[in-house]
Amino acid sequence: MLAEELKASDVGLEFLTGELKGSHNPSGIVFTVLAALSGMEREYIRDRTLEGHESARKRSSGPCPGPRPAPRPRRPG
C-alpha cells in the first residue's frame, strides 16, 4: 500500500497553511481523509465538466459547434 511505502521511506505529510498546519504521519487518519476528499473532488469536477459539455451541446446550432471556417479565396479563372 502507498501509505506503508511512504512511511518506510521516511516520507511525511506537511501542511504549510490551513486547519491542518504542521507535519503528519502519512499512514494516519489525515492521509486517509485527504485521499477520500480527493476522490470526491475528482467526481465533482467530472460531473461539472459533463454538465458543461451538455449545456454547450444544447446551445450549439448544428452538428459542428464552434466558429465557421474562413471562406476560401476564389481562384482567378
Image: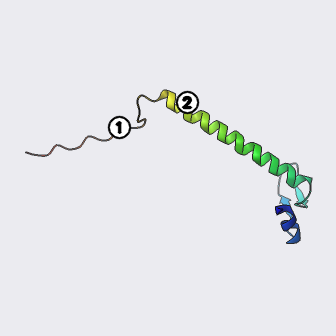
Quadrant of the image containing the N terminus: bottom right
> Label 2 sits on what residue type?
Ser
Q: Position of residue 25 (x, y in %)?
A: 91, 61
> Which element carries disc 1, helix, strand or loop?
loop
Q: Residue at (60%, 37%) from the top-left corner?
A: 50
Say which of 23 and 47 sits in front: 47
Q: Residue at (10%, 46%) from the top-left corner?
A: 76
Between the C-alphas of marks 1 and 2, the distance is 20 Å
Q: Residue furthest bottom?
A: 9
Q: Residue at (41%, 36%) from the top-left corner?
A: 64
Say which of 12 and 54 sits in front: 54
Q: Position of residue 66 (x, y in %)?
A: 42, 37
Q: How would you rate the neighbour count of disc 1 (Cα within 10 Å): few for under 14, some for 14-19, many for 20 or more?
A: few
* Residue carrying label 1: 68
Q: Is residue 35 left or right of residue 51?
A: right
Q: Quadrant of residue 15?
A: bottom right
Q: Residue furthest left?
A: 77
Answer above or below: position of 54 versus 71: above
> Label 1 sits on what residue type?
Arg
Say which of 73 and 33 sits in front: 33
Q: Which mark is residue 55?
A: 2
Q: Is residue 21 left or right of residue 65?
A: right
Say which of 19 and 51 sits in front: 51
Q: Position of residue 60 (x, y in %)?
A: 45, 30
Q: Is residue 62 left or right of residue 28?
A: left
Q: Is residue 42 left or right of residue 29?
A: left
Quadrant of the image containing the C terminus: top left
Q: Quadrant of residue 14?
A: bottom right
> Which element carries disc 2, helix, strand or loop?
helix
